[in-house]
């Protein structure tokens, strides 16, 4: 119970030195946060776009999930169980062991062949694309426009249309049924050359090259110390495209190579699949599925390893002018 004295003291304490009364603010309700306007950095949510993206994700991951699940089944489990669920027994390790040792370990031989084709073909195609793209973007020479037209025309021509003429040419040179029949055509990448051409024209400022030349740097030193680090994102992109194209190449080895010892993985797995349709042939569908899973593992690992070079080089060409 408050007395008049305590009430007066409280009022006196609430008054400032000047004697003006202080009004206590009334309880205010919290204001609703104002929504930020939709901009390219803060886009409006789109339900149709989300649905389409989800369907694309499902379309991409569903075959991979099917491959992983069925790699754990033996030959009987593939036929008796549901395709998108595991069988009672898991045979993944047994399938991997049988795949690597079947037919005297021919799968390992096919894997080494594929690595050879990728290292020599895709690696060489990347080197040639980087050198050619840089030269076409930063040097003026007679016939430059003609080269540009030829490159654009080569990009528009599908590789399968050139397979038969390439086979006839290599057959006259005696290079068919040899690794060179796969490596040499893989060295030519019109799309990679065009991509590096366009990328080098934007990523390397002409002023930077002129400053290096004024300081006495030679063309090779300028390329390796200044231009090549700036070209790293484009180089990794061309390398990934070339590696995937060479790794998955099927039609060119099919018409060029007849010796199973020089088969790549794509042709070898196809031969295993055709083996089941041959009279008296052994059906090895469990090994085919497991081999397909082992085939995509190196590509996934390479993508993960090269991703940091890809991302770290995205800002390498930013120059304040």
Image (cartoon, grey):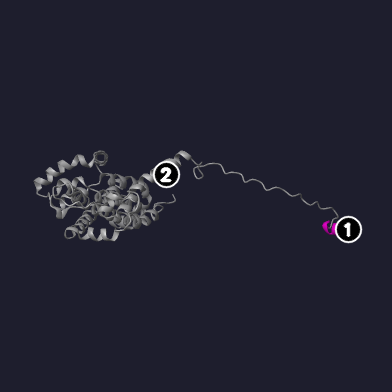
Q: Is residue 61 above or below residue 105?
A: above
Relative to 300, residue 163 above or below: above
Residue 55: horizontal and vertical position, in percent?
40, 42
Q: Residues within 10 Å of mark 1 (few under 14, many from 20)?
A: few
Image location of residue 21, percent across then percent down? 84, 53
Q: Is residue 226 above or below residue 169?
A: below
The stretch drawn in magenta includes residue 11: yes
According to the picture, the residue beneath numbered tag 1 turns out to be 8
Relative placement, left or right, of 173 versus 299 is left
Residue 16 percent across, percent down from the top left = 82, 57
**Residue 147 appears in which quarter of the rendering?**
top left
Crowd tier of the residue under label 2, counting other residues whose Cα lies within 10 Å: few below 14, some 14–19, many 20 or above: few
For image coordinates 9% across by 45% down, the residue present is 172
Left or right position of 221 against 12: left
Mark 2 to mark 1 CA distance (whole Å): 70 Å
Question: Which label number is shown at residue 54?
Answer: 2
Nearer to the camera, 194 or 278: 278
Magenta range is 7-16
Residue at 33%, 45% (x, y): give it: 198
Element type at mark 2: helix
């Amino acid at each position: 119970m408050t007395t008049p004295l305590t009430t007066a003291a409280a009022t006196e304490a609430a008054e400032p030195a000047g004697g003006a009364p202080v009004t206590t603010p009334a309880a205010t309700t919290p204001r609703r946060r104002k929504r930020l306007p939709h901009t390219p950095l803060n886009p409006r949510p789109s339900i149709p776009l989300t649905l389409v993206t989800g369907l694309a994700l499902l379309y991409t991951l569903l075959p991979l999930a099917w491959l992983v699940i069925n790699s754990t089944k033996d030959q009987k489990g593939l036929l008796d169980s549901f395709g998108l669920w595991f069988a009672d027994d898991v045979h993944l390790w047994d399938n991997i062991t049988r795949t690597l040792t079947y037919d005297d370990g021919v799968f390992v031989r096919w894997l080494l062949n594929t690595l050879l084709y990728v290292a020599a073909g895709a690696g060489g195609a990347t080197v040639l694309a980087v050198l050619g793209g840089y030269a076409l973007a930063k040097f003026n020479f007679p016939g430059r426009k003609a080269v540009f037209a030829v490159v654009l025309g080569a990009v528009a021509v599908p590789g399968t249309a050139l397979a038969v003429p390439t086979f006839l040419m290599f057959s006259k040179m005696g290079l068919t049924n040899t690794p060179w029949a796969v490596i040499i055509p893989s060295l030519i990448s019109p799309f990679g050359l065009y991509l590096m051409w366009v990328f080098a024209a934007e990523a390397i400022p002409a002023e930077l090259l002129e400053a290096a030349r004024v300081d006495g740097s030679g063309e090779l030193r300028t390329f390796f110390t200044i231009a090549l680090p700036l070209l790293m994102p484009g180089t990794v992109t061309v390398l990934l495209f070339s590696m995937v194209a060479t790794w998955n190449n099927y039609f060119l080895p099919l018409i060029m190579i007849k010796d199973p010892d020089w088969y790549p993985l794509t042709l070898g797995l196809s031969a295993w699949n055709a083996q089941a349709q041959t009279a008296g042939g052994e059906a090895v569908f469990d090994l085919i599925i497991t081999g397909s899973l082992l085939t995509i593992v190196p590509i996934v690992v390479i993508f993960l390893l090269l991703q940091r070079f890809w991302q770290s080089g995205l800002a390498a060409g930013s120059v304040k002018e």
